[in-house]
Amino acid sequence: MAFTIAIDGPAAAGKGTISKAVATHFGFGHLDTGLLYRAVGAKMLDGDDPVTAAEALDVSDLDREDLRTPEVAQAASKVAVIAAVRAALVDFQRAFARRSGGAVMDGRDIGTVICPEAEAKLFVTASAEVRARRRFLELTGKGSVITLDEVLADVKARDERDMNRAEAPLRPADDAVIVDTSTLTIDEAVAQAIAAIEARQTR
């Protein structure tokens, strides 16, 4: 039986961590849809046309080692505003969402555009400052030489672009449950998410 959980939110809010934990808890498949855009962004940085890259995208492209770099993150945000790129990736996402055995989809527009009929929708958020500090610690922990101010500026720039793009802007679905992780531990955030989903399952 198909059961789709749509988890949206801005960068570094914790939706990836929550999505993986939720998928494990319920035994569902998990797709980080942001990786699709990062893969296209990486191909654009390689010199490929982003629309052509999106149309030819393969699951193996999601295994590239460089998809988590700041450069690829910025490229992903840029290709995501291209309508033809988004259109090329919609079918891929919708097919995964209705897979047998349930699916957890995390991204920017799952509950609003990709899967508006999802059985459960969450919008995971946190303040820009909290998200920037999390991303800063993640990047410096991997050896990146970057300042907190630079990361905060990057987070705010991505928010501005994602929230104000013409195609599928980042916003909560009308029926999404908001999970603000600014002051929550990972365990608390996951528990809130699971409780919200279980409430939808019993309806």
Image (spheres, grey):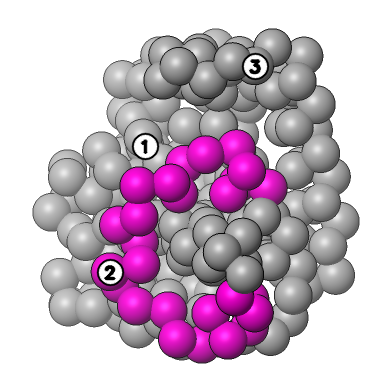
Spatial separation of the CA atoms under disc 2 and disc 1: 24 Å
Mark positioned earlier in the residue sequence (1 or 3): 1
Q: Say few, some or many: other residues with alpha carbon within 10 Å of mark 2 (under 14 / 14 to 19 / 20 or more).
A: few
Q: Amino acid at mark 3?
A: Ile
Spatial separation of the CA atoms under disc 1 and disc 3: 26 Å
Q: Residue at x 75, y 20 (%)?
A: 150
Q: 107 or 178: nearer the eye?
A: 107
Residue 80: x percent and y percent? Answer: 68, 66
Work out which quarter of the rendered image holds the C terminus and state it: bottom left
Work out which quarter of the rendered image holds the N terminus and state it: bottom left
Q: 50 or 178: nearer the eye?
A: 50
Q: Which residue is mark 2?
A: 60
Kindly identify which numbered label has been placed on residue 76: none
Q: Amino acid at mark 1?
A: Ile
Image vertical order of residue 157 relative to residue 1, above or below? above
Q: Which residue is mark 3?
A: 146
Tell which tag, 2 or 1, sits nearer the viewer.
2
**SS at circle 3:** loop
Mark positioned earlier in the residue sequence (2 or 1): 1
**SS at circle 2:** helix
Q: Say few, some or many: other residues with alpha carbon within 10 Å of mark 1 (under 14 / 14 to 19 / 20 or more).
A: many
Q: Quadrant of residue 13?
A: top right
Q: 69 or 80: nearer the eye?
A: 69
Left or right: residue 148 compared with residue 70: right
Does 67 lie within the magenta span? Answer: yes
**What span is colored magenta in the figure?**
48-74
Residue 94: x percent and y percent? Answer: 42, 80
